[in-house]
Amino acid sequence: MTEGNGGDGGSAGDDGEPEAAEGDELTYADAGVDVDASEAATAALIGAVGADTEAEGSGSEYAGLLDIGDRYLALATDGVGTKLLVAEALGDYSTVGIDCVAMNVNDLVAAGVRPVAFVDYLAVDEPDERFAEQVGEGLARGAELADMELVGGETAVMPEVVRGLDLAGTCAGLAAKDGVFDGRAEPGDALVGWRSSGIHSNGLTLAREAVTREHAYADPCPFDGYETLGDALLEPTRIYTDLLDPMRAHGVRGAAHVTGGGWTNLERLGGHRYVIDDAFDPQPVFEFVQSEGNVTDEEMHRTFNMGTGFVAALDSDAAESLADATDGRVIGRVEAAEASDEAGDEGRATVAIRGLEL
């Protein structure tokens, strides 16, 4: 079983918004999502079922892999999270389907797997043709961008369980056994990164809390590119399937989809020190969230992608070529970590970025 790390799913007050006192220094946990508690719960789930599942197949940090002979069948599942509350507030569900697809297919790409098919699960408190149509259009657009088939799904009406709606999906992919990424970086590797489109679909509980302290989603956006603040939060997640072939051609060892947990996702590539010295600049939406929520630099980088949504580790000699063949750039390097008794031979994984040690 792979570790859960997808769409933000924080708790909210009766009005659909997180509760915190104005002016307080915000953290993701204060806003409603305790990442450490979430990881502990995931570990408990894996501990309960992992022994049985490992006998049937294999897995990466981003997808479950099932041996079907000459290939792996890969599966990933994820949802949109509390970004849906922004869509609800604006009455605009036209892009959340793209997010649902993106959060799944990007995980498969990080494993080195080509997405081939997608099914969705829409749970609602009451049927509504208007938002169902918008969600469907977004799912179709996401599948088109990912170059895969949308093969069906399920709509459940559960008024006693769901308030509004929840949207999730499962993606299937195929890969030759020698095509999946090893998933482990090596000291001396370079790190190539690709820009995000914005917040994507992670950390929205913290972002919503910060934005709504003194503003409404329908307020005019104070930075360029969007009519309202809500529009900036709804910018759909970028889909990275176009990177799969170039990454394979350049010998990528492992990749990281920068989702929940922010830049600490690089630690999935092994117990090394990941030095980022040329990350993409954060989009203005991150600066606005940080300012309005009084969020520390460290908390921002542990929660959000901060402008870089996907990272690959590969031999330093091939890094510039991969960056030139795509719209990426070399953003850093992998160094050996100090060994410790607690972390084992590799050492404890850390990320150094913008003067921070995560």
Image (cartoon, rainbow, N blue to C red):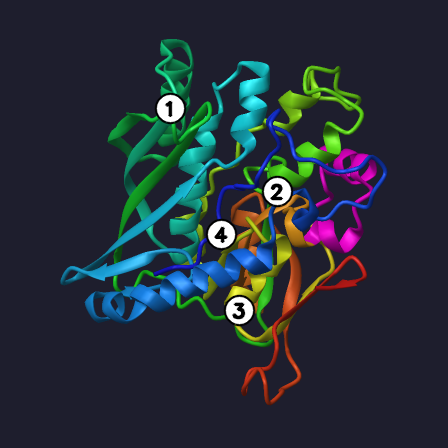
Q: Between residue 246 and residue 36, name the one nearer to us.
A: 36
Question: Three-letter amino acid code at disc 1?
Answer: Pro
N-terminal label among 3 and 1: 1
* Magenta stretch, residue numbers: 280-301
Q: Is residue 10 one of those drawn in magenta? A: no
Residue beneath disc 3: 315
How far from the left and from the top, in percent, is residue 198?
63, 35
What is the residue that sits farthest to the right in this orientation?
23
Q: Is residue 345 above or below residue 306?
A: below
For the point 70% across and 47% down, which residue is it? 30
Question: Three-letter amino acid code at disc 2?
Answer: Gly
Question: Three-letter amino acid code at disc 4?
Answer: Asn
N-terminal label among 4 and 1: 4
Mark number displayed over residue 203? 2
Q: Disc 3 to disc 1, how far (Cα)?
A: 53 Å
N-terminal label among 4 and 3: 4
Q: Disc 3 to disc 2, how far (Cα)?
A: 32 Å
Other residues around mark 4 within 10 Å, as few (<14) / some (14–19) / many (≥20): many
Residue 252 is at least partly visible in this image? no
Q: Between residue 25 and residue 222, name the one nearer to us.
A: 25
